[in-house]
Amino acid sequence: MSAIFKPEGDLFRATERAGGPWSPDMLQGSATTALMTREVERLAAKSGFAVRRLTFDLWRPAGLRLFRSASELLRDGRKAKTLQVRLMDGDTEIGRCTALLTAPSGESPIDPFARPVAPDKGPEAGSPPPAFAQKWSRYFQHVSVRLIEGALEKPGPAAAWMRLDAPLVEGETNTPLLQAVQAADFSSGVAQIVDMRQWTFINPEISLYFFRPPEGEWILIRAATRVGAHGAGLTTATLSDRNGPFAEVMQAMSFERREAQSQAS
């Protein structure tokens, strides 16, 4: 199967499968964050530290072009390290990931206040979205989706299993961390609460907090969105695999009403 990116030496060329929802010639946010995560994961494995937080700032849209990543170690501690990975389009920085890594410990304490939670239904028990919703973007057409609560085409909280079926990078297998990050970018879409004929919404950033490594290909997003003042909003989501929750997601949202002329067209 064709990949989202094709390597060319130390560079990565976006294929048409990387196209996003606003234009088929513009990079999908999930592709942007996942490609930066690939470099974070490589550096984390080299250090022996665990990925605990990933914060992505998505600064500007990018075309389907040739990209490179530039990494820097901001903090090199015995118990915690902070990395920075920048995604570059030539000399233009289109996004940045700040990653917190921590040294693994031999054991974890038992939470005396934890309550048993019924396991979520697996992706086999879910249902695919309507065909028109799956055509949201070229990238999304290569993501398997199985809904277990709510609906993508209707406003409100929802829960959906997702799996990127195409390789992120040609010749490589998608890791569980890559699957988690690419899925997380869809949190605001899973939990959209507005009529998209009347409103637009974007998330210029996204943060993931991990309390254990993800496992497997399928990632469950359970998301909800809240709206505040002056067009501000917040999407929060819990990410789970077949063994249960492993991360929390936060996305700062910005809402804007469409112009009346655009609504009528």
Image: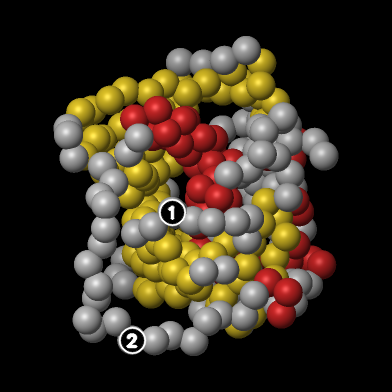
Residue 128 x/y as whole percent = 76, 72
Crowd class of label 1 (few under 14; some 14 to 19; many from 20; radius 10 Å): some
Quadrant in which the C terminus appears: bottom right
Quarter the N terminus occupies? top right
Q: Is residue 144 above or below residue 58?
A: below
Upstream in sequence: badge 2 or badge 1 = 2
**Image disc number at residue 213:** 1
Give the residue drawn at x 65%, y 46%: 20
C-beta proximity under 8 Å, tags 2 and 1: no
Q: Which residue is mark 2?
A: 115
Residue lying at the far front in this picture: please name it. Answer: 106
Q: Position of residue 7 (x, y in %)?
A: 66, 21
Name which residue type carries label 2: Arg
Q: Is residue 44 left or right of residue 259?
A: left
Q: Position of residue 141 (x, y in %)?
A: 76, 53
Where disc 2 sits, the SS reads loop
Closer to the camera in the image, 236 or 213: 213
| Front one among 102 and 180 | 102
* The quadrant where residue 34 appears: top right
